[in-house]
Amino acid sequence: METKLPPASTPTSPSSPGLSPVPPPDKVDGFSRRSLRRARPRRSHSSSQFRYQSNQQELTPLPLLKDVPASELHELLSRKLAQCGVMFDFLDCVADLKGKEVKRAALNELVECVGSTRGVLIEPVYPDIIRMISVNIFRTLPPSENPEFDPEEDEPNLEPSWPHLQLVYEFFLRFLESPDFQPSVAKRYVDQKFVLMLLELFDSEDPREREYLKTILHRVYGKFLGLRAYIRKQCSHIFLRFIYELEHFNGVAELLEILGSIINGFALPLKTEHKQFLVRVLIPLHSVKSLSVFHAQLAYCVVQFLEKDATLTEHVIRGLLKYWPKTCTQKEVMFLGEMEEILDVIEPSQFVKIQEPLFKQVARCVSSPHFQVAERALYFWNNEYILSLIEDNCHTVLPAVFGTLYQVSKEHWNQTIVSLIYNVLKTFMEMNGKLFDELTASYKLEKQQEQQKARERQELWQGLEELRLRRLQGTQGAKEAPLQRLTPQVAASGGQS
Amino acid sequence: MAGAAGPGTGPGAAGGDGDDSLYPIAVLIDELRNEDVQLRLNSIKKLSTIALALGVERTRTELLPFLTDTIYDEDEVLLALAEQLGNFTGLVGGPDFAHCLLPPLESLATVEETVVRDKAVESLRQISQEHTSVALEAHFVPLVKRLASGDWFTSRTSACGLFSVCYPRASSAVKAEIRQHFRSLCSDDTPMVRRAAASKLGEFAKVLELDSVKSEIVPLFTNLASDEQDSVRLLAVEACVSIAQLLSQDDLEALVMPTLRQAAEDKSWRVRYMVADKFSELQKAVGPKITLNDLIPAFQNLLKDCEAEVRAAAAHKVKELCENLPTEGRETIIMNQILPFIKELVSDTNQHVKSALASVIMGLSTILGKENTIEHLLPLFLAQLKDECPEVRLNIISNLDCVNEVIGIRQLSQSLLPAIVELAEDAKWRVRLAIIEYMPLLAGQLGVEFFDEKLNSLCMAWLVDHVYAIREAATNNLMKLVQKFGTEWAQNTIVPKVLVMANDPNYLHRMTTLFCINALSEACGQEITTKQMLPIVLKMAGDQVANVRFNVAKSLQKIGPILDTDALQEEVKPVLQKLGQDEDMDVKYFAQEAISVLALA
């Protein structure tokens, strides 16, 4: 197998960043937009889960697993699993309370049993277990009650059947983690179709469910070697659909978090498939509107890749420059943050390749009227490593940013920005006084040249426009010509006039 | 590059090859390469001008290769390029050379960004029509094949949109190949490609021979409709509409209906939603017999679906479904098989379902006739008029005209009034706005007496609403009412009440008087305007609030053309002149504008 997972016993290992809860980015203003929104009346709806429920049978409590002799244990286990496959309507919270309680108790017992009793997981119970899990967790997720659901602002819809669902997930997890668990037996039931449905559940609006799914998928990836490539492929399909078709999928952050630890385990040299995933999936993910929800995890994945293979740096930085936000300042700050993370690990040989376009963009950020963007960009100069890279390449970097910095230092409305820029200019002066003086001297000349160029451009286009009009007039006589032949005629008659 | 002369030399030399010295391609290409995205974008948007300057020959040999080679740019620039190239056939020398445009468009059809790709496909479709049959096979079809076997999903999705434009004009051997390529895209490994293929399946089926539809398209349809991803399955429902139109009843029953029945009961609500959403199209496509046997029971299930989204989509289609039933036996079918389900929906737990139903339910009255409407529908209308959700009530009121034709509105007026009054006083101004917009319609149907008695006071109350949009709408409403009820009615009921507001202590209300006069003067005519309105307007010229004064100037400009010359010269002119000397800048400005527009200088 070309990939190995880090020996993380739990996905909440310190190696993956987002696994500790990601704090929401600071709000620009102190106002909560929520107060402006009127509270939506909760729409009652029933869940798709109960559509095919055949006539509900009455559940009766079975004896406890620990009370029966070992010879009857497995037969009872099967009956309990079958009991747990019965579904209840949780939107009607008073319906069939007794049945719900029987199932809850049975699930609790199963969780307990699979976690602590050795020798329970024999081959014949696998199909029953997977069937029970499938029946409970696999469902078409209901339509979102709020079509403009904003994961940062709105309260998510919680899954009403969570009291049972949680126990099923807990059971599933302990099943996978049991020392008796045999992937070679389970792979007959945990197949591609199963994994695909598992991945679809990541769109759940309930963060508790996604948290369980994340851990479970991580285990599945770790234990079923034959499913790894398939899981990676399906993840990239989900991302591509999210980027190019829907812009809506709740579990992106969780999937990226798992991928972060998967990338961490990639063997070197990286396979083309993995590089392609970085360039064609992870980089375009930056263009999505709701970037802030999963940016920390995404940036982690990107940096992981660069730490594995520095030659990808140019691709990544050019990609980020291509998707650089045009209007969303909040995203721009995130891009700058990610760029600094990348520069922290960049190799000087790679830096040389992208320094010019990169610092032109940084200069544009410094001139942003939004002071947070300008400030974030100027903080690059507080980074010792970046500063040393700039110093080593000052003959390229300085000319790329000087004009903008010089102009902004005279024009920016925010005093903090102006004084930060003065500091940067001072650093430049100390870095290379001679170059600094030359740039100052040529600044005015360049401004004049720019104006001259703009004038020439205007003249050029004016000339072209006149030419076009003359050509069109030239064809007035030839109007009867069929439409498709109109333009060749234009050229011909233009020549005669 | 030819000629070193810069721009601006010898513009008189505009002619076929004389262009070389005029605009060297290097200068133009520099513009297309400019570092500033905005300038690049501007240049690309004027690409046709550049091509015109170069002439057809050099556009083909120099400009297009440049464009093909340098396609790595901002998506916005690429989008503009893709769009331009769709209209470029003339600029490269007409249909004989249309194939020159294919290389750049082919690259554009493979980029990541969806809008660029879609635009490139659109342009390619456009250009395909300009190809000769020979060129189509020699150049266009190979391009489609290359895209269809591209290694990244973007090119394969783009290919899906091109099959139907080249198929009809291809030779039979090539046709077989094209079908083969389409088949493999329908079972592509990537769901994005399968979705693209599924969404073009109907379009492709339409250009195929009937035999191929039966032997090839139907199996593809069946497969896509049972895809593992619901996003693919739901697109097959759309294709179903087109395919059903092509088949005979027997073939339909045997080949398509099993799949459609399955879709209507799909475990994913998105697929069921799609069936509900496309119901009218499906109904028309399968014809009356299958509709009765299959679609009506399916529709009943959709109306009581467990997901509100599906119920709402189905409720929207109730009227169209009933309308499209064969006239013979229609009433019985509706009464026995549809109405019971509609009755349930009136008290649905979900407001979107109820309001979807309310937006179409009134339309049933014309189909069912007077007696059925009074006996069966009227109780439903009345229940919905009392619904807790304002949207439901509004939807009923906005469709009153349908009922009016069948049973007359009087039947409803007793229940209507409380509903209207409540909406008129709703806390949300958008609801108030909506009901105002139906006032002229209601007034027309309820008649002047009922209106004067019950609704007139509401209309006047809106004039002093605290939201400007409501006051504005109320003003327009008055104008429409006057157009309906005539000037005499206006003079007796509306005008006096409007004019009294000129003395209101609140300047916003005083301005409303002016706005009403602006709206009403034309409908009321010269006499009322001169005798009743003009004196009030003139008197308000002395108002202490500048906003009122400049609105006086604006009003005078507005009603001026209705007045006769005497009134203009003797009454309006002096007042405007005085306002023209006002201390407030805006008052001065509008007074002077009025003077010049009315030619009183």
Image (cartoon, rainbow, N blue to C red):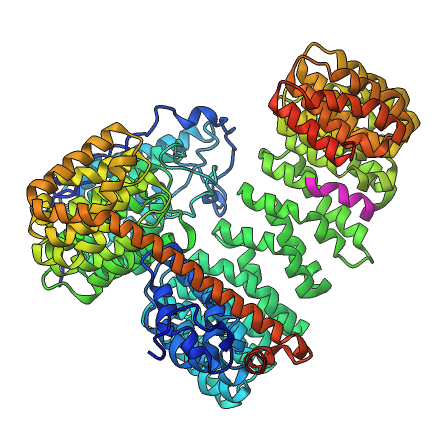
| Residue B145: x %, y % from top left | 41, 79
Q: Is residue A432 above or below residue B227?
A: above
In the picture, which quadrant includes the N terminus of chain B?
Answer: bottom left
Q: Residue at x 67, y 60 (%)?
A: B283
Q: Residue at x 75, y 27 (%)?
A: B555
In the picture, which quadrant includes the C terminus of chain B?
Answer: top right
Of B24 and A360, which appears nearest the observer? B24
| Residue B46: x %, y % from top left | 47, 64
Of A181 and A383, which appears nearest the observer? A383
| Residue A52: x %, y % from top left | 48, 48
Say whether residue A212 is visible: no
Of B338 and B491, which appears nearest the observer? B491
User: Which residue sits furthest top?
Assistant: B505
Answer left or right for B63 relative to B293: left
Answer left or right for A111 relative to B478: left
Residue B599 location, quadrant: top right
Answer left or right for B38 relative to A349: right
Q: Is residue B27 above or below residue A379?
A: below
Boundaries of the magenta span: B359-368
- Residue B363 lies in the magenta-colored region: yes
Dominant secondary structure, magenta: helix
Residue B402 location, quadrant: top right
Q: Is residue B509 above or below residue A403?
A: above
